[in-house]
C-alpha cells in the first residue's frame, strides 16, 4: 500500500472518530440543555401556580380548573394527599412524590418529565410535561440527522484528504520521476530541482541534490584519479620499455646496457614510490590506514630527517635549520610522522629559492605537538592554496624542481586525520610558505574512529 493511501485511510478514520465525537457532544449537550430548559419552565409554572394557592384559617384553597401553559400540566395536592386542583388525570397516573427532584418517569400513557415542589400550607405542586416534547421531537431528529450526516462527512473527508495528499505529494512524484531519469541515464549532472520550498519534501529533494553533487564530485575525482595515476605510471613504464628495447638491440654495448639498467632501476624506484603512495591513499579512503603508536622524541626525529635531506638541499644551495627544544616526547606512528617531515621538507627544497633557507620547528602547544616547515621560496597564490591538497595536483612545474606525483600532501592530510590532528599552510606568493602539522601528544587524547 502506498503512503498516499495510508495517509488518506488514517485521515478518513480520524475524521470519522472526530465527527462521531462531535456529534455525540452536540446531541448530548442539546439533550442536557433541553432538559434544563424544561426544568426551568416547570419551576416558573409551579411558582405561578403557587401564587394562586390561598391558605386561610388552616384551609388551603386552589383553582379547581387546573393550570396548563406551554405544554406543562400543573396539579396541586393537599397535605393529606388528596387532589386539590389542576390536572387530575395527570395526578392519577400514580407517580410517587419526590420534592425537589426533576426526573423522567415511564407510565402507561408514555414518558413524562415530572417535578414536585413544596407549596404553602403543606401542599405539593407538581409539574408534568411529555418527555416526547424534548426527546422525541428534537433529540430524535438529531439522532436521525447524525446517522445521515456521518457517512456524508466521511465521504467528503476521504475526498478532501485524497485531494490534499495528492497535491502535497506532487513534488514527491516529480522527485521520483527525476530520480528514475537519473538512474536510467547514469547522468549524475542532472538534479531533481524542485526549487524553493520549506516543506519536508523540498528539503529532502534538496538533500538528494546535495548528495548527487557530492557523488558527481566523487566520481569525477575517481575518474581524474584513475587518469592521473595512469599518466604517472605510463611515463616510467615507457622509459623502462624503451631502455629494455635499446639494451636488447645492442647486446655488445656494455656501457649502454649499464646506463639502461640504471635508468630502469631509477624508473622502477619511481613506480614503487608511486604505488606505495597510491596504496596509502586507498587505505586511507577505506579506513584501513591505521597508526602504530609508539613513544619517541620528536626533535630527534626532525634532526634525523634534516640530516638525510642535506645533500638534496645542498644541490640548490639551500640551508637547513631547526628550532626546537631538546626533548618533546610524543605518542604517534613514527613512520607516518617521518613521512610528513620528509614531504614538507622536500617540498620546501623543491619550491625554495636558490641559495635560500628552510626552517623546521617542533613545539608543544597545550596537549598538542606542532610541526612547521618554513621557507623563503616562491610561495603559493591564494586561489591555489585549497587545491594543493588535491590528489595529483602539482604547482607550476616550471617554477620548481619537484618531480613528485602530487600525492604527498593528500597523504599528509590522511595522516593528520587518523592521528586526530590537522594540516594546513600559510603562504604569500613570492615570499615563501609555512606548512603546519598538529597532532595530540598522547594517544589517549584522540579517540580513533
Image (spheres, rainbow, N blue to C red):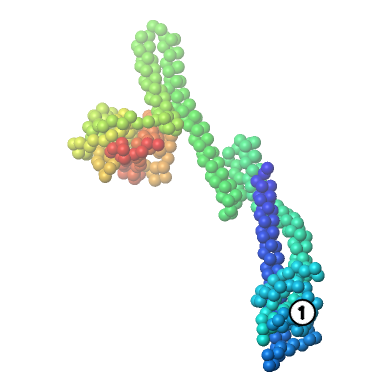
The residue lying at 38 percent from left, 44 percent from top is: 381
The residue lying at 45 percent from left, 13 percent from top is: 245
Residue 274 seen in this snapshot: no
- Quarter of the image for residue 443 reads top left
* 302 on left or right of 147: left
- Judge the density around disc 1: few (<14), some (14-19), many (≥20) Cα neighbours within 10 Å: many
Residue at far left of view = 326
* 152 on left or right of 179: right
- In this view, the residue in front, 61 or 407, is 61
Residue at far bottom of view = 57
- In this view, the residue in front, 442 or 268, is 442
Picture coordinates of residue 316, whole percent (x, y): 28, 32
Q: Which residue is mark 1?
A: 73
The residue lying at 26 percent from left, 30 percent from top is: 305
Picture coordinates of residue 319, whole percent (x, y): 24, 34
Picture coordinates of residue 325, whole percent (x, y): 20, 39
* 442 on left or right of 42: left
The residue lying at 55 percent from left, 41 percent from top is: 212
Q: How many marks?
A: 1
- In this view, the residue in front, 140 or 20, is 140
* 296 on left or right of 286: left
Amino acid at each position: 500500500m502506498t503512503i498516499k493511501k495510508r495517509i488518506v485511510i488514517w485521515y478518513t478514520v480520524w475524521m470519522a472518530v472526530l465527527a462521531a465525537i462531535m456529534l455525540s457532544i452536540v446531541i448530548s449537550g442539546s439533550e442536557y440543555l433541553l432538559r434544563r430548559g424544561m426544568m426551568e419552565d416547570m419551576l416558573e409554572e409551579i411558582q405561578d401556580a403557587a401564587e394562586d394557592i390561598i391558605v386561610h384559617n388552616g384551609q388551603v384553597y386552589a383553582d379547581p380548573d387546573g393550570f396548563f401553559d406551554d405544554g406543562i400540566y400543573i396539579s396541586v395536592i393537599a397535605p393529606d394527599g388528596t387532589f386539590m386542583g389542576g390536572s387530575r388525570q395527570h395526578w392519577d397516573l400514580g407517580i410517587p412524590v419526590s420534592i425537589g427532584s426533576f426526573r423522567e418517569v415511564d407510565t402507561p400513557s408514555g414518558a413524562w418529565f415530572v417535578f414536585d415542589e413544596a407549596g404553602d400550607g403543606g401542599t405539593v405542586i407538581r409539574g408534568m410535561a411529555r418527555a416526547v416534547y424534548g426527546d422525541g421531537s428534537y433529540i430524535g431528529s438529531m439522532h436521525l440527522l447524525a446517522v445521515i450526516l456521518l457517512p456524508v462527512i466521511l465521504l467528503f473527508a476521504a475526498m478532501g484528504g485524497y485531494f490534499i495528499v495528492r497535491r502535497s505529494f506532487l513534488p514527491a512524484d516529480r522527485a521520483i520521476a527525476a530520480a528514475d531519469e537519473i538512474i536510467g541515464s547514469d547522468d549524475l549532472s542532472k538534479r531533481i530541482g524542485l526549487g524553493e520550498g520549506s516543506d519536508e519534501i523540498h528539503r529532502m529533494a534538496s538533500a538528494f541534490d546535495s548528495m548527487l553533487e557530492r557523488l558527481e564530485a566523487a566520481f569525477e575525482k575517481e575518474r581524474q584519479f584513475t587518469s592521473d595515476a595512469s599518466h604517472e605510471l605510463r611515463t616510467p613504464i615507457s622509459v623502462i620499455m624503451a631502455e629494455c628495447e635499446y639494451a636488447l638491440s645492442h647486446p655488445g654495448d656494455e656501457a649502454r646496457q649499464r646506463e639502461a639498467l640504471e635508468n630502469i632501476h631509477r624508473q622502477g624506484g619511481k613506480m614503487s614510490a608511486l604505488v606505495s603512495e597510491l596504496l596509502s591513499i586507498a587505505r586511507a579512503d577505506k579506513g584501513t590506514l591505521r597508526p602504530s603508536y609508539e613513544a619517541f622524541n620528536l626533535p630527534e626525529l626532525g634532526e634525523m630527517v634534516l640530516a638525510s635531506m642535506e645533500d638534496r638541499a645542498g644541490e640548490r644551495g639551500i640551508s637547513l635549520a631547526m628550532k626546537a627544544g631538546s626533548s618533546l616526547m610524543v605518542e604517534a606512528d613514527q613512520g607516518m610522522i617521518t613521512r610528513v617531515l620528509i614531504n614538507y621538507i622536500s617540498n620546501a627544497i623543491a619550491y625554495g629559492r636558490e641559495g635560500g633557507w628552510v626552517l623546521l620547528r617542533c613545539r608543544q602547544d597545550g596537549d598538542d605537538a606542532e610541526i612547521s616547515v618554513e621557507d623563503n621560496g616562491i610561495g603559493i597564490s591564494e586561489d591555489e592554496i585549497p587545491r594543493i591538497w588535491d590528489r595529483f595536483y602539482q604547482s607550476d612545474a616550471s617554477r620548481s624542481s619537484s618531480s613528485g606525483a602530487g600525492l604527498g600532501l593528500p597523504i599528509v592530510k590522511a595522516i593528520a586525520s587518523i592521528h586526530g590532528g590537522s594540516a594546513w599552510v600559510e603562504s604569500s606568493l613570492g615570499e615563501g610558505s609555512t606548512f603546519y602539522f598538529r597532532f595530540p601528544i598522547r594517544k589517549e587524547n584522540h579517540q580513533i574512529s
